[in-house]
Amino acid sequence: MPDTPPPGPGPTEWNPHKIGVGPWDEQHPGRARPTGPEWDPQLLDEGDRRNVVDAYRYMTREAITADIDTRRHPLHIAIENFDNDSNIGTVVRTANAFAVDTVHIVGRKRWNRRGAMVTDRYQHLLHHDSVAALAGWCAGRDLPVVAIDNTPGCVPLETVELPRRCLLLFGQEGPGVTEQGQQAAVMTCSIAQFGSTRSINAGVAAGIAMHTWIRQHADLSRAW
Ligand SMILES: C[S@@+](CC[C@H](N)C(=O)[O-])C[C@H]1O[C@@H](n2cnc3c(N)ncnc32)[C@H](O)[C@@H]1O
């Protein structure tokens, strides 16, 4: 089951700048308020300053998630979380933007949500205690695991055809994808580098890899 998002305001509610829209009656003078369970009465009364696209203004969290569910891609993302969670928020936010099916957190359950900018509220999240548990979950669904790392034996992400249904597995700063993670994967893909650094930030690598999948498999006519 997806984890329940934490209650209360998040970073985008603290934003002092006016983004979004004001109360419905101010925005749409003379137009009847929409009715139905997908509309949030408080947002209609007070305005909607959340970090959501305009198509979702005034809608409840549940209604937004349900709408994304009708368009989610058969792409799963997993990130190992054994000792460093600083990139997970970025990964979740990018996964939300690309309508990823589920983000899997492997290892420690807790992670720093600040970088997610509240996008985790609309993203299915699943926790697994270990890489073995994640691998078992994928095996039960015939979902191939593709590790993303620049380790010996990897193939270039720039030239590989990613499976349409797959889970992309990312490692952490320092150790990279664990040995168990690489063993569970049908292949490991590297992102080409040309400078001096051994690797790029895991959140950036996740964005590049997700977008590679999008370029290969998404229906771009359905993007916002
Ligand atoms: C900062 S890297 C550390 C591991 C790296 N193998 C090393 O030797 O330093 C953390 C994670 O970001 C991703 N990553 C960073 N650079 C990458 C690259 N050039 N190709 C593929 N993945 C990369 C991988 O998922 C990796 O596990």
Image (spheres, rainbow, N blue to C red):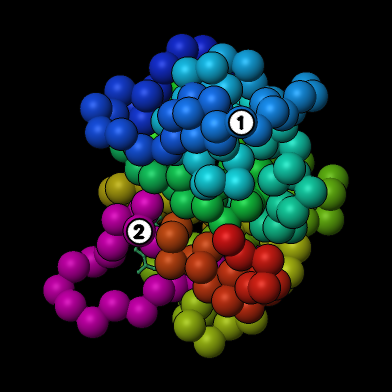
Q: Is mark 2 within 8 Å of ligand 1?
A: yes
Q: Quadrant of the N terminus?
A: top right
At mark 2, the secondary structure is: helix
**Kind of residue indicated by mark 2:** Val
> In the image as oriented, which residue stretches furthest toward the left?
196
Give coordinates of residue 46: x percent, y percent: 47, 18
Q: Does the magenta-highlighted stretch encompass residue 30?
A: no
- Magenta-colored stretch includes residue 203: yes
Q: Quadrant of ligand 1?
A: bottom left
The residue under the point 67% across, 73% down is 221
Which circle's residue, 1 or 2, is located before the other in the chain? 1
Q: CA distance from mark 1 to mark 2?
A: 46 Å
Name which quarter of the figure residue 29 lies in. Answer: top right
Residue visible at 30% across and 23% down?
A: 14
Q: Which residue is mark 2?
A: 204
Kindly identify which residue carries mark 1. 30
> Can the viewer see residue 194 in this picture?
yes
> What amino acid is labelled 1 in the image?
Gly
> Quick check: 146 above or below 125?
below
The magenta-colored residue range is: 185-205
Q: Nearer the viewer, residue 45 or 7?
A: 45
**Vertical position of residue 155 compared to residue 4: above or below:** below
Q: Quadrant of the C terminus?
A: bottom right
Q: Is 33 on the left or on the right of 116, as rendered?
A: right
x and y, in percent, of residue 44 in the image:
57, 22
